[in-house]
């Protein structure tokens, strides 16, 4: 790709030495090949929104964050269109994300949300999420939908739609009271299921639904495959471009899922988010927690995962089979299922990856 742009949440950089502001990602290798950069590392300032470009000076828009990022993406694509340059654009807005309170919701959207909300059956009576929080979440979702619509409308009217692959997805879900939990980092469907919509007029059939196992690691090889580019040899994941275009079916029977450290920003163990590994198939979710407890759900018969089949004597064959499948997937991933604190030496003081399960990372 001749042009690359990252808009929104960026990547970690060293907070020491010549770059004391950890939210600024200086030009160089930590931008992972992006040439155009309007991004930040992490903050919750959705309205007092700021980002960085090539200097460690904050840029402000005075508008809601996703609205600004959508404007930036459209402006960048238009610049590339006028110059005849191909592009790769990554738009990574922070919302929908806690805190789910009115002051963080996009202006004018909360009023459009229903006053009465629906809760799924796996939300307990002592729901940790309130009606108002769910309405704020839905308002943020509606804003994301509207901004996606703006991006697609630009591609249509600019004539770029038929030559542009669009992927709409997320990094994780949100429990919103299901299983008595909020946030993420647990193996339940609300946290690990993410939206995935692909559009490429003339190549991907409009309205088609594909029942395939797809993980975030598959994005890069899939995009390479769709674009006719070789997949880098050191990249994990599977090229599912043929599945997306209907050329062939999904051959995978299972994927590895897991939560590696119980700390949000540091390597910890034994907190409210204990470590786990698991297997997701088209029918089952099997989980083993670091302390040894197991959970097994038949997602077809029990989509809200309300009945743990592990230890109940039900589905014994599935339990044996998925235990073995987890062992195989862990071995293939070079994952010894260690406590979160066991990963601390994989990174240096600037949070650069220096080793993996395969050994030291080449410099």
Image: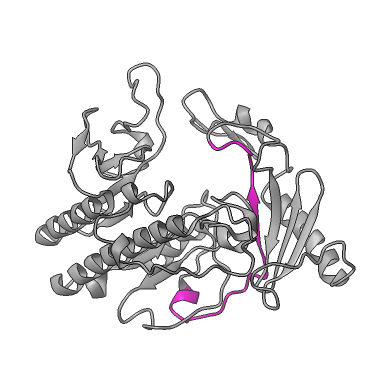
Check the image and report above or below for 272 versus 308.
above
Q: In front: 173, or 22?
A: 173
Residue, far left: 82
Q: In front: 358, or 187?
A: 187
Identified at 64% across, 73% down, the residue is 303
Magenta segment: does it hold 259? yes
**What is the image's colouring?**
one colour
Q: In the drawing, does residue 84 fall left or right of residue 329?
A: left
Percent of width and height locating residue 43: 36, 38
Quarter of the image containing the N terminus?
bottom left
Q: In the drawing, does residue 106 fall left or right of residue 210?
A: left
Identified at 25% across, 71% down, the residue is 163
Magenta segment: does it hold 280? no
Identified at 17% across, 43% down, the residue is 61
Is residue 187 among the parts visible in the rendering? no
Check the image and report above or below for 261 versus 289.
above
Residue, far top: 17
Identified at 37% across, 16% down, the residue is 17
Percent of width and height locating residue 232: 47, 53
Percent of width and height locating residue 183: 54, 50
Q: In the drawing, does residue 309 fall left or right of residue 40?
A: right
Q: Splitting the image into 4 quarters, where does residue 116 fall?
A: bottom left
Q: Which residues are magenta?
A: 242-264
Q: Splitting the image into 4 quarters, where does residue 196 fall?
A: bottom left
Check the image and report above or below for 27 versus 163.
above
Q: In front: 175, or 153?
A: 175
């Amino acid at each position: 790709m001749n042009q690359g742009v990252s808009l929104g949440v960026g990547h970690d950089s060293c907070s020491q030495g010549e770059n004391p502001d950890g939210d600024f990602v200086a030009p160089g290798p930590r931008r992972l090949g992006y040439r155009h950069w309007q991004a930040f590392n992490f903050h919750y300032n959705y309205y007092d929104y700021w980002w960085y470009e090539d200097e460690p000076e904050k840029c402000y828009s005075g508008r809601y964050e996703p609205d600004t990022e959508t404007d930036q993406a459209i402006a960048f694509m238009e610049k590339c269109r006028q110059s005849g340059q191909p592009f790769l654009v990554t738009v990574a807005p922070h919302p929908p994300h806690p805190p789910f309170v009115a002051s963080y919701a996009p202006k004018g959207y909360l009023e459009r949300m229903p006053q009465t909300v629906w809760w799924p059956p796996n939300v307990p009576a002592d729901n940790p999420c309130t009606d108002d929080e769910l309405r704020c979440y839905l308002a943020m979702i509606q804003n994301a939908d509207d901004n996606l619509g703006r991006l697609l409308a630009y591609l249509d009217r600019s004539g770029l739609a038929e030559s542009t692959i669009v992927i709409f997805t997320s990094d994780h879900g949100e429990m919103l009271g299901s299983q008595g939990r909020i946030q993420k980092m647990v193996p339940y469907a609300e946290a690990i299921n993410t939206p995935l919509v692909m559009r490429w007029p003339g190549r991907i059939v409009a309205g088609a639904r594909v029942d395939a196992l797809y993980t975030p690691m598959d994005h890069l090889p899939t995009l390479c495959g769709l674009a006719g580019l070789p997949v880098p040899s050191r990249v994990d994941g599977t090229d599912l471009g043929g599945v997306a275009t209907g050329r062939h079916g999904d051959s995978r029977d299972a994927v590895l899922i897991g939560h590696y450290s119980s700390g949000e920003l540091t390597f910890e163990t034994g907190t409210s988010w204990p470590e786990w590994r698991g297997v997701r198939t088209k029918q089952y979710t099997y989980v083993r927690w670091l302390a040894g407890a197991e959970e097994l759900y038949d997602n077809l018969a029990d989509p809200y995962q309300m009945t743990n089949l592990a230890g109940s004597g039900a589905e014994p064959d599935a339990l044996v089979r998925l235990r073995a499948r987890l062992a195989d997937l862990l071995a293939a991933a070079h994952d010894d299922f260690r406590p979160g604190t066991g990963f601390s030496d994989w990174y240096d003081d600037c949070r650069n990856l220096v080793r993996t399960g395969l050994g030291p990372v080449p410099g």
